[in-house]
Image (cartoon, rainbow, N blue to C red):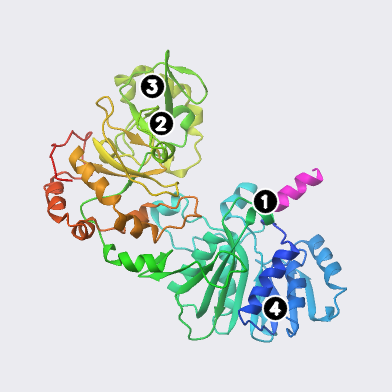
Amino acid sequence: MATTDRNSKVVAEFGDFQTPHSLALNAVKVLHRLGLRPRCIVEPTCGTGAFLVASAAVFQEAERLIGVDINPSHLKEARTKTVSLVDAERICLREGDFFKLDWGQLLSGCPRPLLILGNPPWVTISELGALKGVNLPEKSNFHGRTGIEAITGKSNFDISEWMLLRYLDWLRCHSGAVAVLCKTSVARKILIQAWKHAYPVKSATIYKIDAQRHFSASVDACFFVIETEPGATATCCDVFENFEDARPSHTIGLYGGILVSDFAAFSRRQALLGTEDRYIWRSGIKHDCSRVMELTPASDGYRNGFDEVVCIEDAYLYPMFKSSDIAKGRRSRRNFMLVTQTYVGEDTSRIAQVAPRTWRYLEKHATILNERSSSIYRDKPPFSIFGVGAYTFAPWKVAVSGFYKRLHFECFGPVDGRPVVFDDTIYFLPCRSEAEARFIEVLLNSPPALEFYESMMFMGDKRPVTGELLRRLSFKQLAELLGKAPEYDLVTQGIEEWPHRYGGRIRQGTQRRLPL
């Protein structure tokens, strides 16, 4: 293996982004400014020693500095950096695998308070699995995900997330601090775990960093600090835009088990938090094979993702919109989706009788469809899809992209007499009529609703809008706030007679004119 290939594998398998000295020094100076005065500093994945060198310079009163790493070449470089320090005898370096080392024994002799710091791996357990990596913890669904959440990947986690929870375990009964470079999404997950499981959090702080500049990594990252103290119960975290800012830009915190991105904004709209019993947010169709299942109209029929001419019946084709269409306000139909089922698990063999050319097209690409990796297709009929039900064929829908930072809800009606469908990057509400959809669109795009949602959105996330977030808003309470309670009662009248799932495709609902 070439040297560059070997280095690439190390970065991939171990999340091995070595910290620039300037970044480590600025981060450690912030800790000193916060008032931390550790007697012992431990870096469980010390790499080439940037944090140890910075800590030795800033925390001159610290009695011991301990660095551990699995990579002997990194440790050799770290020894070269630290041996020339005036007080090098304070620093102890040792080779060890984080997941096998007896940390209880190593930490038992450390003077307190303890500072655990560094730059743990930026890699997920599923990425390591794909690489057949061995530097990982024992596999476990430690979030306690169940059912479809675990199957569809919500049980996946960053290695650093698992490690940071171990750090906090070491400090459960002690005053100390954890200070690490990590993905901002990981920092938030750790805060939720710490607050929900009563870790003794005295304070928490996030300092944003430019991961692209420091690590050539396109990810939202930060320097994350948690101070612990027995009996402490803090449930908020100040967020600073950089190391130099004296005041936080905003504060995140926990409210009723929900992580709030802007406590001030959330406080203004807290009354909208509630259960919505009339509408259920759905996600678009998941098929994991866009080259086969998504078709573009052409003069000679359709074309698929392989640029093949496709001549099939229209029976299973539906006008489709994607996240980019919603974000750009695109209203004209561009593509079609091949929708093979009306509900999950439905027998697909009927397609051969109803639309034989469609069936032959699917059979032609059966190998690709059968190779879809997600376990949701396992033991299902051939050419199955997921996230499909009667709601998919509702005549009117109000939709929002899960990916885009600008929150905006769009109303969609039938195209050429057929209901539109969405890919799985979109969330939507099925509606019976245009009047109902227009009313819901107005509600959701109102300033109170947008402020409510945005107070809980984290714009740095790959998918800042989630079904969990959308379900937190009570439409009834929103309508009352906007003075539209009568319209809400009218538009939802009889909705219990129109269940969100039943046999067959949804019929066009009764039209009502409402004063919107």
Sequence-first disc among 3 and 1: 1
Can see residue 486?
yes
Sequence-first disc among 3 and 4: 4
Q: Is residue 269 magenta?
A: no
Spatial CA distance of label 2 from label 1 is 40 Å
- Residue drawn where x is 76% and y is 61% of the image: 71
Sequence-first disc among 3 and 2: 3
Write down the residue under mark 3: 359
Q: Secondary structure at mark 4?
A: strand
- Residue drawn where x is 30% and y is 20% of the image: 353
Q: Amino acid at mark 3?
A: Trp
Label 4 crowd bin: few (<14), some (14–19), many (20+), radius 10 Å: many
Magenta range is 1-11
Q: Amino acid at mark 1?
A: Ser
Write down the residue under mark 1: 216
Give the mark toward the camera: 4 or 2.
4
Q: Amino acid at mark 4?
A: Ile
Write down the residue under mark 2: 383
The answer to whether marks 2 and 1 mark residues whose Cβ atoms lie closer than 8 Å is no
Spatial CA distance of label 1 from label 4 is 28 Å
State the predominant SS element of the stretch in magenta: helix
Q: Quadrant of residue 36?
A: bottom right
* Front in this rendered view, residue 202 or 331: 331
Q: Which mark is residue 41?
A: 4
